[in-house]
Structures are given as structure tokens and as C-alpha cells.
Amino acid sequence: MELWIPITIGAATAQTLRFMLQKRLKGMALSTAGATFARFIYSSPLVAVIAVIYATSSGQGMPAIPPAFWPYMLAGGTSQILATMCVVALFSHRNFAVGITFKKTEVLLSAFFGFVILGDTFTTPTVIAMLIGLGGVLLLSDPPGGVGPWHQRIFNRATALGLGAGVLFGISGNGYRGASLSLGDGDVFYRAIVTLALVTAFQTLAMAVWLMWRERGEIGRVLASWHVAGLVGITSMIGSICWFTAFTLQNAAYVNAVGQIELLFSLMIGAFVFGEKVGRREWQGLVLLTISIIMLVLLL
């Protein structure tokens, strides 16, 4: 098994736990932006410390950042902020498992953006597998007990938030891969942790400025919720380190494809933690997505 596969599974595990905690934060009177900010404010200092320790102990020192790094970093960091906000907002409309499944449209979209931005190529069978996954997403987009014309049931706010998250996560994954690869010197983990440290520092600053401007008092509420928000930061840090390392080793579409194991984790958390039930149509959509995941894993 190639190294990036278990690293990706570790990333998916940490990310599922982080979204679970953010769903709890959303229920603790924090805004969508506040619940999103929690992942950055508590993780960025830890990531910075790890980056400095590793750069020093490995003898690689501080990196020389090329000009090509910054556009990739800014695109990836900004789109991840917006994507996370979409997912947190989606939890108010659909259950936890379905919310995470909508997010997984990033597999298809990261393949597209990887082709456009980085020149990644894909075989016909992998494209077919991704299209099967799209069919699952269309089934999931129809809300339980939906009535009325099909286009009004499918094209709703929940669908827009889910697909928006998929588009933005697709952009961020390829942005992070491009940024990491632009650091030509250093081993894989060094390039991943340096990229992550700079990205999370930017995201923390950007979110803090936004909250001070638009939602005064929200930063204080995030800090007051440290007992849950701190765990969001820790799981975010673990997941991000794994994602960034995997993106450095393999193209974003394949990493996100294996990362769909997050769906199974989210089903278990939705059922056992939040007491949520998944309807028949949603199960059908999840089955199609599972088939898509299995095909992709076997084809990689």
C-alpha cells in the first residue's frame, strides 16, 4: 500500500471528528463564521511550533518561498475558509452524514480543477467511477419527503451549500498541492508542514479581521467555548497535516477519492452521537457513492 493512502485515511478520521465538534459548536450559539474560526485560532499556533521544530531538528532551516507559492496558498486558504463555512451552515438544513456526503462532491470537482490548474490526467474508468458518485449526490440532494417539481427539490439551499463546499474544497486541495510542490527543496513532510503553517496563519488573520468587522463579540464567544473549540483546533491540526502530506505525495482527486471513507465515519457519528436517521433515498445515494469509492480505490 502506498504511503499516501493510510495518511489520507488518518486525515479523513480527524476531519470527521472535527466536523462533529463544529456541529456541536454551531449548537452552542456560535455563528457559522465563529465555528469556522475555531478550527484556525486553536490549530495555527500548534502548526507553527511543529514547523519550526521540524525545520530546525531536520537541519533544513527556514525555506525560501518562491513567488509561485503565494497565489496557490491564497487560493487554497481562502477557498477552504468559505468551504468550511458552507459545510457548517449545511448542518442546519440536513443531517450530519448527508452534509458530509454533499461535501464529497469535491472528488469530482478536484479532478476537474486538477486538470485545469495542474495538468493532472485521469483514465476513462476513473471518470466513470466519479460520475457514478455524481448520481449518488443527485439522489442525496432531494430532501426527505420532498414534494413538488423535481428541479425545485434538487436545486435548493442545501444543495447549493453542499455543491459550493465541493467546488471550494476542490480548489483548495489543488491550491495546497500547487503551493507545496512549488517548494522545490526539502522532504515531503517539510514542504507540507511549511505550507500548512503559512496557510493557517493567513486563515487565522483573515477570519479574525472578518469577525472584528462583521461579528463583534464572536471571537470572545469562541474563546469562551475553548473546551470544545480547542478540540476542534487539535483535530483540525492533525487532519490538516495528514491532508497536506497526502496532497504533496499524490494528486488531489485521488487523495479526495480515498478520503471518501469519511462518509462511513460520518454515518456512524450521525447515528450514534446525534441520533440521526438516514432515509431510503439517502441510503440509495450513499450506496452509489460507496460503489464509486470502491471503484476508485481499486483503480488507483
Image: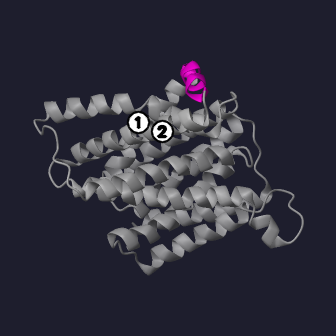
The answer to whether 148 appears left or right of 273 in the picture is: right
The answer to whether 17 appears left or right of 282 in the picture is: left
Q: How is the image coloured?
A: one colour
Between 25 and 289, the residue placed more toward the observer is 25
Between 291 and 251, the residue placed more toward the observer is 251
Residue 123 at x, y = what percent? Answer: 41, 78
The answer to whether 137 appears left or right of 59 in the picture is: right
What is the quadrant of residue 96 in the picture? top right
Residue density around tag 2, few if under 14, some if 14–19, many if 20 or more, within 10 Å: many
Q: Secondary structure at mark 1?
A: helix
Residue drawn 32% across the image and 42% down it: 198
Quadrant into which the C terminus falls: bottom left
Residue 296 at x, y = what percent? Answer: 47, 66
Specify the amino acid type for callout 1. Ile
294 part of magenta stretch: no
Q: Which residue is mark 1?
A: 238
Q: Which residues are magenta?
A: 217-227
Label 1 with label 2: CB-CB less than 8 Å: yes
- Observer able to see residue 294: no
Counting every numbered tag in the picture gives 2
Between 225 and 1, the residue placed more toward the observer is 225
Whichever of callouts 1 and 2 sits on the residue coming sooner in the sequence is: 2
Residue 5 at x, y = what percent? Answer: 37, 52
Specify the amino acid type for callout 2. Ala
